[in-house]
Image (cartoon, rainbow, N blue to C red):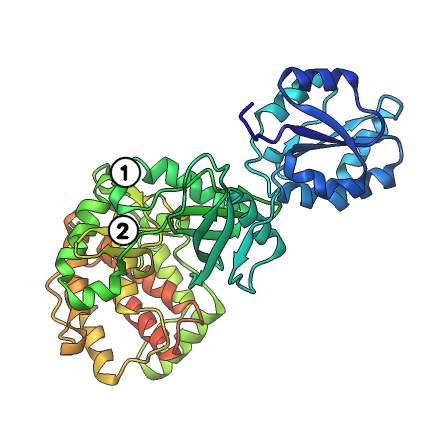
Amino acid sequence: MEPGARSIVLWLGASPSTTLRGALSERGLQLKRVNEKALTRSYPRARGLIVAFEGNVGEFVGRIRRNWKDALNHGLTVGTVCDQRANLLDFGRVQGALPKIPVHRLIPISQDWTRIAQLFDRHDPGPGAEKPLRLLAIPKVLSEEEKLLLKRGFADCTLLRLKLLKGGRSGAKLLLAHPVEQKKSAHRRRTMPCVIKLDDRDRIAGEVANFSQFMEGCVPFNSRPNVDRLRGAEGSSAAMLVQDFVHRAIPLLDALKIGSPALFIASLFECALKGCRSGVTPMHGGLVAELYRLRVLNWSKDLDDAATFAQAHLGAKRSPKALERRLGALGTSDFLRCTVHGDLNPGNIFVASASSDTILIDFYKTELGPAISDPAALEVSIAFPAGDKAFSPAEERKIAALYAPPLSHSASGDLSAKDWWRRETIRAIRVHALAMEPRAKSPTKPTPYSIAVACYLLRFASYADNLPRRRRALAYTLAEKLLG
């Protein structure tokens, strides 16, 4: 048992088993009987909670429902046991009335006390929020559970300054945190600023798993932030991911407007993502099905609204249902499969100051997919950036010229001097996308890259928060033309 580790297993109920007490003691753990009033102040030093069934169904279910969330929010794992004087059949039947506690935080029902002791011993609750941590500039959007996660993850600090950052469409909360003061007893000095992501428990778990499985060994360390696993924390419904803060890095869009788009895009695909894109596998199959699997397409009411506007004002001919049928009729294609970021847009890409090195963040959607999906996603997000700025009629015509099929890196769309960077960026993206695209076998069928771009254009058109509606209608119209 490490110094300062949480070594107490709490027992809520009648006298606990002496066998379990001995099995825990052998592992350096202590079994402590408590009443409900003492639970809250006991959680910071505990690693687990056992609720005993003593025969009264209502009382047992009430104890679980009142306490399981707080226990999980403090990092504990929870178990239930049947007292030797209670009816075992009643105990089995009452399990269906209990809240759905995550499997990895639940000790399976058993009377094998040694096994139960082993499971508590293996559980790592992380540091407890035992001593007060002052949070400066606490964003009002934080829940009590999220504040507790911060106090657990930064339990080695006495003062933490916070700043709310702009999040994406997922609804995750992003914070910039600066540990101003650390406790003198802290085992290691960690005072560098970091980025905190607070989101649904399963989404955070998925992002951490994707980072470990796909990115940690494929993306160079200087092209991604590292995950601080010692500060990560999980509650009953939310979880916290802590990553390095990249100093003196600027957003990709800002870099593109003042530097060389071709250089930055080459750095992205040939350096940052080289390890992902070098391990390609040739595929022959349903490209559209792969894009569905990546959750690219979203046949929403907002898409219907954009289509109606496009048909009335921009010359679109087909309904979303007709485009859905068109995609389904495309059949199979040759394409390359590799590890893809899954959400490659300017908000997830930064450029290191005084350098062309690109840095990636947000790996929740990282998985295996078509190699052309990342360039297609980035191209559409460059052509149709986030915000509510309307295109002028002249800009609409120039954007449309970039999407005259078939797509190529020599696209002639001549944007204004102000927007030169957008044309050059799209051309640079297509150089890397088309270099990995097998030659089309049918001159009448859209190329795989055209299909992928069309699907991401439809995705942009399917969300009402992409304002104004005319921009979404333009994306819909261009997607229709690309699909033929």
Q: Quadrant of residue 52?
A: top right
Q: Nearer the viewer, residue 443 or 351?
A: 351
- Looking at the rendered image, the disc whose residue lies closer to the viewer, 1 or 2, is 2
Q: Is residue 238 visible?
A: no
Q: Nearer the viewer, residue 359 or 110?
A: 359
Q: Nearer the viewer, residue 123 or 91?
A: 123
Residue 135: percent from left, percent from top: 53, 56
Q: Which residue matches tag 2?
A: 359
Q: In this rendering, would 39 be left or right of 253? A: right
- Residue that appears at 31% across and 59% down: 345
Whether residue 290 is situated above or below residue 300 in the rendered picture: above
Whether residue 47 is situated above or below residue 394 in the rendered picture: above
Q: Quadrant of residue 274?
A: top left
Q: Tag 2's secondary structure?
A: strand
- Residue that appears at 60% across and 48% down: 132
Q: Amino acid at mark 2?
A: Ile
Q: Which residue matches tag 1?
A: 218
Rendered-image quadrant of the C terminus:
bottom left
Rendered-image quadrant of the N terminus:
top right
Crowding around mark 2 (Cα neighbors within 10 Å: few <14, some 14 to 19, many 20+) is many
Q: In this rendering, would 139 be left or right of 309? A: right
Q: Tag 1's secondary structure?
A: loop
